[in-house]
Amino acid sequence: MGTSILQGILNAKAQGIASTSPDAPSITKFVACVNSMASVQRLRDEFQDSEVRVNVIVANSVQAMQQADIVLLACKPHMVDAILGQPGARDAVAGKLMISVLVGTPVDKMVNILTHGSDVWRKKEDISNLQIVRAMPNLAASFRESNTVVEMGGQLRISSANKSIVRYIFACVGHIVEVGPAQYDAASVLAAASLAFLTVAIDGILDGGVKEGIKRSEGRDILVTSLKGLVGLLEGKGGDRNGMKTGDEIREQFSSPRGTTIEGLVGLEEDRVRYAYCRSVMKATKRSLEM
């Protein structure tokens, strides 16, 4: 995910977006921390033509955080204890904006790791220099079409300047939705994991097309274009009224008595597909809250 965000920001800078925003931080270099030489080479190959310097550090996250003015935490959730709990991590992020794109992993957990489990919530002065924001973009960040959920509330008081920086960074990679801590996990599933859920439906539709004689490559082209049209319909384009349309309104428009669409929809309802997708969001949200 970190690579996708970096690619999106670099693309925004290349297109001149960074220079036109009043909230744009002066980004002159990036510091990336990875665990293997293979990852170093991959990043160097990917960003070798970038006008902005990308410095890659191997297996020394404290050094990377010390060098950075803004810290983007994009490791696996199970690695957060080792990274933030190591000696020097607290001092390395003190007074800096730290943006976590980890699944789950609430702010209070990261604070407790940084402070080694002390009773910091009763001692506000101990955390006054911590500025931790949670964000969940999706893989479309690399081509600037992510839908990023951001949480900047909670126990920590994020400065107005840092809020502006967060909004700028994720505006570079797409759209932003700001939510509170209670909504963050479910909203993150809708913004990111749901894309993977929808590919199951896409593959099922393509399988049906193949079964009925359509080549998979041709079916994919047809379906991708149709999905773009569906997005337009959901946004309310092409209608007599302004505003977004609901799924049931669109299904009603497509369905005619004894027609093919209603026949297929009845089959989906018989197989409880709607419930299956509802349950997938519920289970993913529960898992996020457990992390």
Image: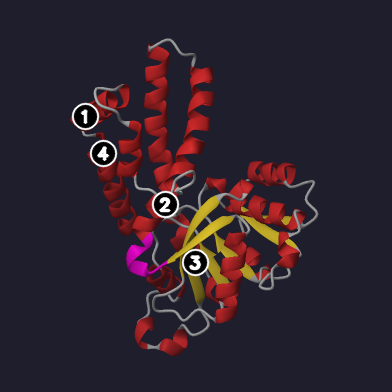
* Alpha carbons under labels 2 and 4: distance apart: 21 Å
Which region shows up in magenta?
Answer: 179-184
Specify the amino acid type for callout 4.
Answer: Arg
Which one is in front, 127 or 146?
146
> Which quadrant of the figure has residue 103?
bottom left
Residue at image position (49%, 14%) is 215
Query: Where is mark 4, residue-wise?
Result: 274
Query: Where is mark 3, residue-wise?
Result: 84
Query: Is 91 left, or right, of 125 in this rendering?
Result: right
* Alpha carbons under labels 3 and 4: distance apart: 40 Å
Q: Element under label 4?
A: helix
Which one is in front, 240 or 172?
240
* Alpha carbons under labels 2 and 3: distance apart: 43 Å
Query: Is 177 left, or right, of 283 in this rendering?
Result: right
Query: Where is mark 2, residue-wise?
Result: 244
Query: Where is mark 1, residue-wise?
Result: 271
